Image (tube, helix red, strand yellow):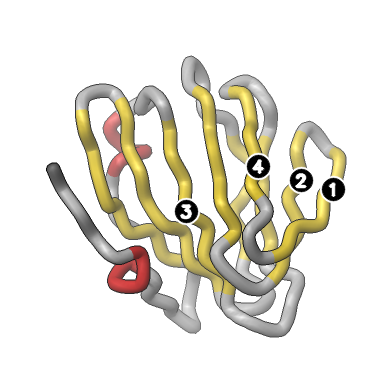
Amino acid sequence: MDKHSLSQFMEYSSEKFTKRVIFKKGESTAFVLNFTPGQQLPPHKHPGTEVFLLVKGGSGTFTIDGVEHEAVANDVVHCGGEEMFAFKNSGSEPVSLYVVLTKVPSPEYAKDI
């Protein structure tokens, strides 16, 4: 068993969003994306996997296949791997997203940035 507190992975940078990997087990990975107001994750896909996201605080806008969806703390989102996905912290507070990928599409998806 492995146990961690999400709060230790909620690290913010004024320069760009951060990604902190919590687990990489088998073909799955779990990580936290951290955004200060105005920061965003560019549009991308996760081929061959399912993506599950939990908004840990604040608010933001998911853009999935060109459609915007507002999200607030405790909202849970699922995206298929072929859906074009982006996120922007459109609120006034920091936002952290807890993310689980059921299969890592490439090693780049399981690295801290």
Bin the neighbour count of mark 4 within 10 Å (Cα to Cα): few under 14, some 14-19, many 20 and up: some
Q: Quadrant of residue 57?
A: bottom right
* Horizontal arrangement in the rendering, residue 87 relative to residue 26 (left or right): right
Q: Earlier in the sequence, mark 3 or mark 4?
A: 4
Q: Residue at x 68, y 26 (%)?
A: 83
The residue indicated by pointer 1 is 68
How many numbered marks appear? 4
Q: Nearer the viewer, residue 106 or 57?
A: 57
Q: CA distance from mark 2 to mark 3?
A: 17 Å
Q: CA distance from mark 1 to mark 3?
A: 19 Å
Q: Earlier in the sequence, mark 2 or mark 3?
A: 2
Point out the image quarter for the C terminus: bottom left
Mark 2 near mark 1, Cβ–Cβ under 8 Å? Answer: yes
Disc number for residue 98: 3
Farthest front residue?
A: 1
Q: Position of residue 43 (x, y in %)?
A: 65, 43
The residue indicated by pointer 2 is 63
Q: Secondary structure at mark 2?
A: strand
